[in-house]
Image (tube, rainbow, N blue to C red):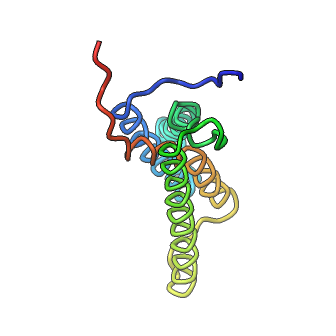
Amino acid sequence: MTKTFSIPLQAPRARALSVLVYSSLAVGYLADAAFPDLEGPLFALTGVLKLTGLVGAAALFLSNYGQQSQMGDSALDERERDERNRAYVATHQIMLGCLFAFFIYGLVAEAAGLWRPQGEGALDMLSAFAIGSMALPGAILAWRDRALPDEG
């Protein structure tokens, strides 16, 4: 059996990384969508936030938590399979909830004349959604992990 690559993270670090990832994605991509003409330092800041979210999401995906969410049944014991399956159900519920919230906001915004992302801004929002969904099962596993830290 080949050993899979993973970035070893303890739960508190993975949790902190998930907060950084989702706040960076939300602020960076939403700012770019809402203010497409940003220039100078603010444009650079949104770029840094978007890159931070992307790299952090990749790190979560490659972490021990993200890899647990990707392993086949034969590589996991019964408890780990149950944890993985619950994380995927929660991911499904969260992502569908976000999609429906965006859908409802779009309907209300159109009727009320509120701001809606257009063109490239809409693609930015879709990118944030896709990047965030990549890391979500691992983030959920990290937040649910109640293991004691290693002593040694």
Residue at the extreme bottom: 111
Q: Nearer the viewer, residue 34 or 105?
A: 105
Q: Is residue 99 above or below residue 87?
A: below
Q: Nearer the viewer, residue 152 or 113?
A: 152
The x, y position of residue 129, in whole percent, is 59, 55
Q: Nearer the viewer, residue 114 or 21?
A: 21
Identify the image quadrant of the C terminus.
top left
The x, y position of residue 149, in whole percent, is 30, 26
Question: How many dots with numbers?
Answer: 0
Q: Is residue 19 above or below residue 98?
A: above
Identify the image quadrant of the N terminus.
top right
Residue at image location 46% in from the left, 41% down from the top: 21
Residue at image location 51% in from the left, 51% down from the top: 82
Q: Is residue 144 above or below residue 118?
A: above
Q: Is residue 45 above or below residue 86?
A: above
Residue at the extreme top: 152
Q: Is residue 127 left or right of residue 40?
A: right
The x, y position of residue 55, in whole percent, is 56, 32
Residue at image location 58% in from the left, 35% down from the top: 67
Write down the quadrant of residue 58 in the picture. Answer: top right
The x, y position of residue 144, in whole percent, is 38, 47
Q: Nearer the viewer, residue 118 or 142?
A: 142
Write down the quadrant of residue 103 in the picture. Answer: bottom right
Q: Is residue 139 left or right of residue 73?
A: left
Q: Is residue 141 left or right of residue 67?
A: left
